[in-house]
Amino acid sequence: MGQQSSKETRESLKPGDHIYTWRTAYLYAHHGIYIGEETVIHFTVNGQSSIRTISSSANSIHRCQRSTCKDPHKANGVVSSCLDCFLAGGDVCRYEYDVSQVYFFVRLRAGMCTFAASDEDEIIVRRAKYLLEKGFPSYNLFKNNCENFAVYCKTRRVDVEYGEVGQSGQINAILPASLRIFKTDIGLRNLPKLEPEELAATLQKMVSQHQSQ
């Protein structure tokens, strides 16, 4: 694959897994939380997750018949999709948690693993379903994106500043490895752990404070 990703089989996936698939000649990856029964909860905007991967072929385009899957060109926010729609013809890879420094450094780019420990699978699935119902702060490639959403579901860790939530590893993949370790990995930063209700209240308070200035 050229990126040393943790490529997996569908059969090996379990509810609570953070999975991703490469998009557009491996320029970036789309991330989500697998909740079982061939279903993924993920974060997208205006069909951005529907871009096919370089590994797709003309015969691998998935034409979904599930009523629960939104039109991939119209999907927006936190959505639920079948695994085929999520992958869009690409391979499924697993994002790794609680990794060692050696494991982290052998990765050719960020956005594949973290030092942060994961919560229990049942809690992760419940958190993803809650955000599917209630929503997650707006999508921005350099601020809040699908990777931030999936990492938050797994860890409750989030970098909260006005107008943004965190910055994903794949956005900072151009940094040298030594800087990537200390600057981008959420597992090495002293960040709060917030449940979805607490996150929503915190962001609302910050918006109110900003508007009053």
Image (cartoon, grey):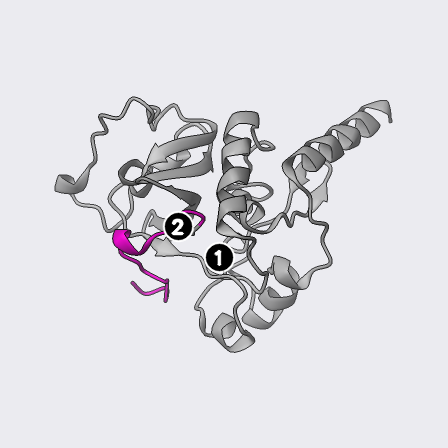
47 vs 154, left or right, is: left
**Residue topped by disc 1:** 111
The vertical placement of 98 against 120, above or below, is below
In this view, the residue farthest toward the left is 59
**On residue 71, which mark appears?**
none
Q: Residues within 10 Å of mark 2 (few under 14, many from 20)?
A: many
Q: In terms of depth relative to the viewer, which is nearer, 109 or 114? A: 114
Q: In terms of depth relative to the viewer, which is nearer, 194 or 31? A: 194
User: What secondary structure is marked by label 2?
Assistant: strand
Q: Residue at x 66, y 40 (%)?
A: 195
Q: Is residue 74 magenta?
A: no
Q: Residue at x 49, y 34 (%)?
A: 129
User: What secondary structure is marked by label 1?
Assistant: loop
163 vs 43, left or right, is: right
Q: Residue at x 48, y 73 (%)?
A: 103
Q: Residue 51: where, in percent of width, then height?
A: 33, 38
Which part of the image, by quadrant, shows the C terminus?
top right
Q: Residue 44: where, in percent of width, then height?
A: 46, 34
> If you read the primary sequence from the N terminus, does the residue marked by circle 2 or circle 1 appear first?
2
Quarter of the image for residue 65 reads: top left
Range covered by the magenta-colored residues: 1-16
Q: Residue at x 40, y 50 (%)?
A: 19
Labels 2, 1: front one: 2
Prevailing SS of the magenta stretch: loop
**Residue topped by disc 2:** 20
Q: Which amino acid, mark 2?
A: Tyr
Q: Residues within 10 Å of mark 1 (few under 14, many from 20)?
A: many
137 vs 72, left or right, is: right
Q: Marks 2 and 1: CB-CB under 8 Å?
A: yes
Q: Residue 47: where, in percent of width, then height?
A: 39, 30
Q: Which amino acid, mark 1?
A: Gly
